[in-house]
Amino acid sequence: MRTLCSSTLIGEFFVIGFAALVAMKDPDLTAGTVWLVSGVAMVLCVALCGVITRPGGTALGWALQLALVASGVFVPTMYFLGAVFAGLWWASVHYGRKIDEAKARFAAQAEASSAPDAA
């Protein structure tokens, strides 16, 4: 799960950075505000890569997805991109867990087959 989720988060890191460049063109927003909010979100993306398998890591990822969609208020394209990344996040979590379960089953089978017989 860690690899798939981290890949999604790193993609979001870049999308947030590019969205910040677009948001700077909004006359109602100051450059400092845009980069403060975007910078926090970008740091959160990288930090989540390290804690994704810990309790609450997936929930923080979902909160980030909601914030990404909500950023469409300032950059309308983010409604679409946020929805795309929310879908990628779901797929990363869902299929990542299935892969982790399959790896655990395979490791258990390999361990059982290599154990010496007690007979």
Image: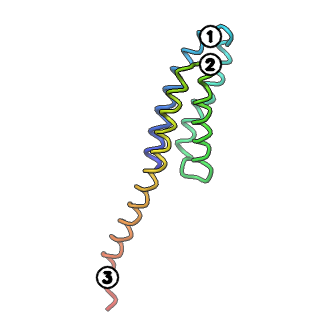
Q: Secondary structure at mark 1?
A: loop
Q: Which mark is on residue 15?
A: none
Identify residue for label 2: 74
Q: For marks 3 and 2, give the one nearer the viewer.
A: 2
Q: For marks 3 and 1, give the one nearer the viewer.
A: 1
- Residue toward you, 83 or 15: 83
Identified at 64% across, 13% down, the residue is 31
Q: Is residue 109 above or below residue 65?
A: below
Identify residue for label 1: 26
Which of disc 2 and disc 3 is earlier in sequence? 2
Identified at 61% across, 25% down, the residue is 71
- Residue toward you, 116 or 4: 4
The answer for how far apart the CA atoms under marks 2 and 1 are is 8 Å
User: Residue 28 location in percent, x, y?
Assistant: 68, 10
Q: Label 1 amino acid? A: Asp
Identified at 46% across, 32% down, the residue is 11
Q: Label 3 amino acid? A: Pro
Identify residue for label 3: 116
The answer for how far apart the CA atoms under marks 3 and 1 are is 69 Å
Which of disc 1 and disc 3 is earlier in sequence? 1
